Image (tube, grey):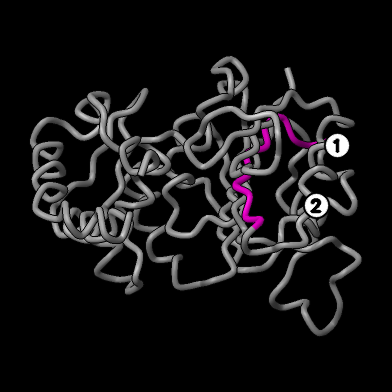
Amino acid sequence: MLKIFNNFNFKIIKIIGLKYFSIYLFFTLINFLRIIKTKKLSHVDFLMGKTDINKFKLDSIIYFDCKFVDKNILEDTYTFGLIREIYFRNCYLKYIPFNIIKNIETTIDLGSNRGVFSCLSTKFSKKIVCVEKNSKYAISLQKNMELNSFSNYFIENKKILQDDLINSENLKTSLGIHNLFEKYEIRDRCLIKIDIEGWEESLFKETKWLNNINILLMEVHPKININLNIEDIINKLEDNKFNLVICDENLVKIKNTKNISFIFAYRN
């Protein structure tokens, strides 16, 4: 329940304004018993997606049309849930120093989904590569990048693998991690966000690509991939001179990797 309570604080008024914050609280109150029973805010997210909310004030204004996305992408999860995670809870940038973020030129959003983090990246990146194997999310990426007046973005509807795993059978559906950097001429000042539902371990079997990275943000899914070797990933990041913060699902810093959910890694 702590994760749910973390979605309610006064800074959210600044992010969505008093009008939509009041609506958000109202939807929460009328669904209180449902929330207690399910331990989820899914129905609140569904209802917020029926409103016209599309403007979020963080350090600067970000536009994201939740209503359009939920109308055109029919799933049992809703866009406002991603807004809560990425904008309200700041689950990807919380522990990254601002002076490191402001020097970023390229963002690779690996597992971009609807593009909520990609739109956030328009405020500090000159180029954004959205990697999402499911092509149905392209309509959301295109719509919301346009809302943010950002055109220097690219969509790769492919699965990212180590280059030696690319062959004639998966060539159309997959792309090598090093080929990705070559294709988009990425050399440094790069942020990579990784949320790829359990197959992140394969990227760390060979880590030369980390030489191009200044910030690495990763959501970890050990329950999906029970064989995921978190310690090995952390060791490789440390060997590559990254500063590390690891957190549980409530974004609380931890030392033991037993309850890890997020990795924040950056180089000065």
**Residue 229, labelled with which disc?**
2
* Quadrant holding the C terminus: top right
Q: Which residue is drawn at 42% across and 48% down?
A: 116
Side of 165 where 145 appears, left or right: left
Find residue 179 and report its image quarter: bottom right
Q: What element carries label 2?
A: loop
Q: Residue at x 48, y 46 (%)?
A: 118
Q: Where is residue 34 in the image (x, y as percent from the top left)?
A: 20, 60
Residue stretch rendered in magenta on the structure? 211-222
Q: Mark 1 points at which residue?
A: 235
**Rendered view: 53 above or below 162:** above
Q: Where is residue 75 in the image (x, y as percent from the top left)?
A: 35, 72
Side of 35 where 184 appears, left or right: right
Name the amino acid, label 1: Asn
Q: Where is residue 22 in the image (x, y as percent from the top left)?
A: 9, 38
Q: Which of 4 and 197 is in front in this view?
A: 4
* Quadrant holding the N terminus: top left
Find residue 149 and report its image quarter: top left
**Rendered view: 132 above or below 171:** above
Q: Where is residue 234 in the image (x, y as percent from the top left)?
A: 79, 38
Q: Nearer the viewer, residue 5 or 216?
A: 5
Q: Residue at x 14, y 51 (%)?
A: 52
**Rendered view: 188 above or below 1:** above
Name the amino acid, label 2: Asn
Disc 1/disc 2 C-alpha distance (Å): 10 Å
